[in-house]
Amino acid sequence: MLPKSFKPVSINEKLEETGMKGKNFIFLTDWTKQQLLSLFEAAEMIEPFWKNSLRLMDGRVLGTIFFQPSTRTRFSTEDAMVRLGGSVLSESNPLHSSSTAKGESLFDYLRTVSTYTDIIALRHYDDADVFRSLGGSTVPVISCGWGNVTHPTQGLLDLYTCYRAFGSFDGMRVMIATPDLSRARSGHSFAMGLAQMGAEIVYVGSSRNKIPELIQGKLDAAGAKYKIYNDLSNDEMMELMGSCDTCYLPGCSVPKDNPEERAAFLDLIRPFYITLEGLQAVKKKFGKTVGIMHSLPRNEVEFEKAIDDSEFQLYFQQMAFSVPIRMALIAAMAGVR
Ligand code: CP
């Protein structure tokens, strides 16, 4: 006997089921496992058609404001709105070409842009200023990277990639490795999503650059299962990798202008370098392929380019999911009519 609720699936109902309409997107721990799974189901419904015309956001406007450089986040967020049938108003150099250059506060900037748009995507170098100013917006705001603490759409994309690759988060262990956990905003966003899904997080870092207190507080409050390993040798890191399902590199910027700082950082990152041979050795010893994920852009001191053409490469595959998941996110937050 079929239940009374038996009926055709509806993308609108799936998006409404997320309960994200009208909310900001700042930390993945702000949303429950069920909300995130509903969003993933909506993204899966969109995936086969994202290059066709899906007019879920017909007549709606996204404002993108990027105070920091971006290739992937801005393009994929704008692409998502365009492919939903909406339009985009974009400011990619606000320090020079917006009234910020005349001293306008971020609060007033957001108040103004939210008058012209239905949803805003904001990247900013100063998370404290954003948290103070967010109340200026009258429409939902998506964090596209604020300070060192949050980059939730990247974390969402990484989480969705795992959902699509592994199907379930039960028993999953993910390594997040970088010599600078103090600035790993995409890694921490991913970790918060993994925490909501009940997966285990294996942080590999350096005792010189600790996880920000704000992040650790949120992981603890979410009951995250995580352990931090500091100052491992490369052999120790690769051995630990054998106990994980995937390894995530949240990216890092090597200091350029200060030779001493640069030399110290290169010294710090050396034990983190991942080679194709190292991954093959892990496979031989542990009998599994541990794929490398990366938020990109990459830096040549992080891992060997030969991994690009191997079975261990997940970082370019991740990007292929970036538009469908952002389409689902925008439609869920702006709300379908
Ligand atoms: N992953 C990421 O945030 O890339 P961009 O800086 O190019 O947006």
Image (tube, rainbow, N blue to C red):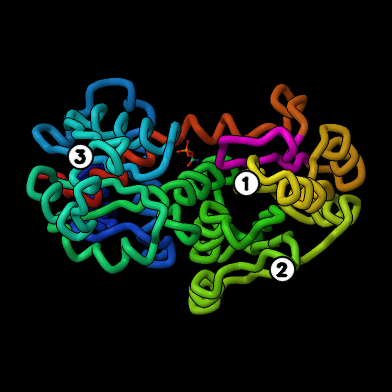
Q: Nearer the viewer, residue 232 or 36?
A: 232
Q: Earlier in the sequence, mark 3 or mark 1?
A: 3
> Number of callouts in the render?
3
Residue at 60%, 48% (x, y): give it: 250
Under mark 1, the amino acid is Cys
Crowd tier of the residue under label 1, counting other residues whose Cα lies within 10 Å: few below 14, some 14–19, many 20 or above: many
Q: CA distance from mark 3 to mark 1?
A: 29 Å
Check contact, mark 3 vs mark 1: CB within 8 A. Answer: no
Under mark 3, the amino acid is Leu
Q: Nearer the viewer, residue 288 or 271?
A: 271
Q: Which mark is residue 252?
A: 1
Asked whether residue 293 is drawn in magenta, I would say yes
Residue 103 location (% of width, % of height): 21, 53
Magenta residues span 289-303
Asked whether residue 53 is drawn in magenta, I would say no
Most prominent secondary structure in the magenta stretch?
loop
- Discs 3/1, front: 1
Crowd tier of the residue under label 2, counting other residues whose Cα lies within 10 Å: few below 14, some 14–19, many 20 or above: some
In what quadrant of the picture does the N terminus appear?
Answer: bottom left
Q: Which residue is mark 3?
A: 62
Residue at 33%, 42% (x, y): give it: 66
Q: Earlier in the sequence, mark 3 or mark 2?
A: 3
Crowd tier of the residue under label 3, counting other residues whose Cα lies within 10 Å: few below 14, some 14–19, many 20 or above: many
Residue 316 location (% of width, % of height): 58, 30
Q: Earlier in the sequence, mark 2 or mark 1?
A: 2
Q: CA distance from mark 2 to mark 1?
A: 18 Å
Instruction: Locate residue 227: give its quadrant.
Output: bottom right
Q: Which mark is residue 228?
A: 2
Q: Which mark is residue 85?
A: none
Give the secondary structure at mark 3: strand
Image side of residue 225 versus residue 147, left or right: right
Residue 106 location (% of width, % of height): 23, 57
